[in-house]
Amino acid sequence: MLGIDPLAPQGDLFRRIRLEDLEDDEGGFDAVVAVRSLHPLRDLAHGLDRVAALLRPGAPLVIDEIGWDLMDEPTLDWLYGQRRALAAAGHGERPASLDELRADWEASHLESHGYAALRRELESRFEERAFLWTPFLHRLLGGVATEVLEQALIDAGAIQALGFRWAASPVVR
């Protein structure tokens, strides 16, 4: 097992590096798990090429990601309400307005890849094995905004699922 992140703690199981700088000194990996780490890659195509090259033949890539650009008005409104409720209970800051929350959301993802770009780049290198839409916003909120509540609203069609999990293996060329 090896964890990589530019801010990772140093140690036997972690390396403080970026994906692009990881050398394959192990002879390939049995799996790669990427949790909310692909959408911010500067060069997504190069990063995914690197992942494919690091995997042993048939080994899986498993990702847990966000389609941040899928945020729609009802989902943003729900997030705003949850943030206001948490702030009223003394947890976190209350956003000044729905417009401010929208601007903050977009600014925080300005250089991130959207859902369509992620899927396009993934599908050009990997063969999908499984896909699942998942709640995501509860991770940002905690407190009253539980995963169960978010999932119930997604199931009812009231808000969008922004999270997704995807498993695949490299396309054999």
Image: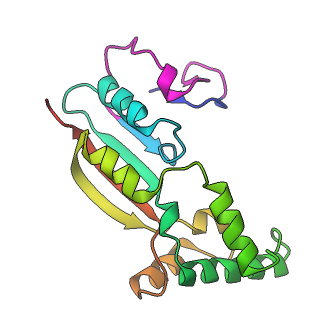
Question: In the rendered structure, does residue 55 fall within the stretch colored magenta?
Answer: no
- The residue positioned 63% from the left and 83% from the top of the image is 77
The answer to whether residue 71 is left or right of residue 26 is: right
**At 60% from the left edge and 62% from the top edge, which residue is drawn?**
139
Q: Is residue 29 above or below residue 85?
A: above
> As rendered, which of 57 and 47 lies closer to the eye?
47
Which residue is drawn at the image coordinates 71% and 80% (left, top)? 98
Coloration of the structure image: rainbow
Q: Is residue 152 left or right of residue 92?
A: left
Q: Which residues are magenta?
A: 9-31
Q: The C terminus appears in which quarter of the rendering?
A: top left
Please determine whether, in this image, residue 92 is positioned above or below residue 114.
Answer: below
The residue sitting at the top extreme is 25
- Check residue 14 for magenta coloring: yes
Give the x, y percent position of residue 157: 41, 86
Which percent across, then down, holds residue 84? Answer: 76, 80
Main SS of residues in magenta: loop
The spot of residue 103 in percent (x, y) is 70, 68
Q: Residue at x 46, y 61 (%)?
A: 67
Q: Quadrant of the N terminus?
A: top left
Q: Nearer the viewer, residue 152 or 99?
A: 99
In terms of depth relative to the viewer, which is nearer, 86 or 161? 161
Q: Quadrant of residue 56?
A: top left
Q: Is 126 placed left or right of 35 in the picture?
A: left
Q: Residue 13, percent across and down? A: 54, 24
Residue 142 in sight:
no
